[in-house]
Image: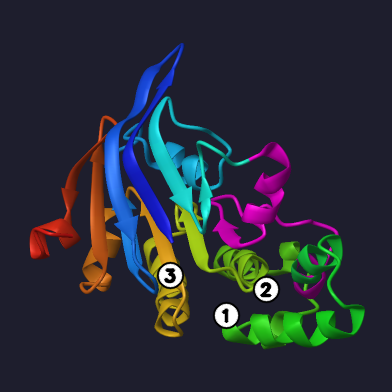
């Protein structure tokens, strides 16, 4: 699904953001990526979406390789990824339902299928009763649920979440984490990037990759299985 093979990323101004990172995300796995600010977490996400390419090493995602993927193929890859950001990125003048539908509209989905798919996805994140609300009429946690639904509606093979609870208080952050856990229980792989280590305690069965100054300094899967 996702494999990093000795991946390093160096920027001309700031130096190395990742250093010799290697891991393999398994099908249906829930994986936390954690570490302090500047550890390389967001760079790792950008490598998965091919927004950035490695300085050395190889990133493989769903049959695509950072060595050989063509520019015109990157949008095709991204349609297979669900990405959730810290700042929601909702269209302010569109309702929750319209925000989620927009993804299907721009990718040319069958018009007759859009409404039922959107309503089904909003139900999956607990927002059936808020489908016709504007973002300004929703709480921060509800807005993030809309963003999760938008990422899910195209049936991606993995859900990438880059600090999805960074703008939320702890209680609401736990509610959002539960949504991701429920999604994972239905079989979807989840990569949950966070600097908030307290969240890890609320999903003790998840895999944890720890980054520090661009290096993977801990991988719970490797600790459980030296051959992983």
For marks 1 and 3, the one nearer the N-term is: 1
For marks 2 and 3, the one nearer the N-term is: 2
Residue found at x 21% / y 67%: 201
Q: Is mark 2 on a helix, strand or loop?
A: loop
**Quadrant including the C terminus:** bottom left
Q: Identify the disc placed on residue 137.
A: none
Tag 1 residue = 125
Residue stretch in magenta = 70-99
Q: How is the image coloured?
A: rainbow
Query: Residue 139's image quarter?
Result: bottom right
Q: Is mark 1 on a helix, strand or loop?
A: loop
Q: Identify the disc placed on residue 189.
A: 3
Residue found at x 56% / y 57%: 84
Identify which residue, 41 or 54, lies in the foreground: 54
For marks 2 and 1, the one nearer the N-term is: 1
In screen coordinates, is 97 left or right of 63?
right
Residue found at x 18% / y 62%: 221
**Which tag is nearer the camera, tag 2 or tag 1?**
2
- Within 10 Å of the Cα at label 2, are there few (<14), some (14-19), or many (20+) other Cα atoms? many
Above or below, 160 relative to 74: below
Q: Which residue lies furthest to the top in this view?
A: 13
- Within 10 Å of the Cα at label 3, are there few (<14), some (14-19), or many (20+) other Cα atoms? many
Query: Residue 10's image quarter?
Result: top left
Q: Which residue lies furthest to the front in this view?
A: 68
Tag 2 residue = 153
Q: Is 86 within the magenta?
A: yes
Identify which residue, 93 or 52, lies in the foreground: 52
Q: How far apart in space, not on screen, are marks 2 and 1 (Cα)?
A: 11 Å
């Amino acid at each position: 699904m996702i494999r990093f093979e000795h991946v390093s990323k160096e920027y001309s101004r700031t130096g190395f953001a990742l250093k010799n990172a290697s891991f393999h995300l398994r099908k249906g796995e829930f994986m936390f990526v954690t570490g302090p600010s500047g550890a390389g977490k967001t760079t790792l996400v950008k490598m998965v979406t091919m927004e950035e390419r490695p300085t050395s090493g190889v990133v493989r995602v769903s049959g695509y390789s950072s060595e050989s993927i063509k520019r015109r193929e990157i949008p095709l890859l991204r349609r297979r990824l669900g990405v959730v950001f810290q700042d929601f990125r909702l269209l302010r003048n569109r309702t929750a339902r319209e925000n989620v539908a927009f993804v299907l509209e721009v990718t040319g989905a069958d018009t007759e299928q859009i409404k039922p798919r959107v309503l089904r996805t909003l139900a999956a994140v607990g927002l059936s009763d808020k489908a016709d609300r504007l973002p300004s009429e929703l709480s921060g946690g509800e807005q993030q649920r809309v963003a999760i639904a938008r990422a899910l509606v195209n049936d991606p093979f993995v859900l990438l979440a880059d600090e999805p609870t960074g703008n939320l208080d702890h209680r609401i952050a736990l509610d959002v984490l539960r949504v991701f856990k429920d999604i994972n229980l239905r079989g979807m792989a989840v990569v949950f990037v966070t600097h908030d280590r307290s969240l890890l305690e609320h999903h003790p069965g998840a895999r944890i990759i720890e980054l520090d100054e661009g290096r993977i300094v801990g991988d719970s899967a490797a600790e459980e299985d030296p051959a992983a």
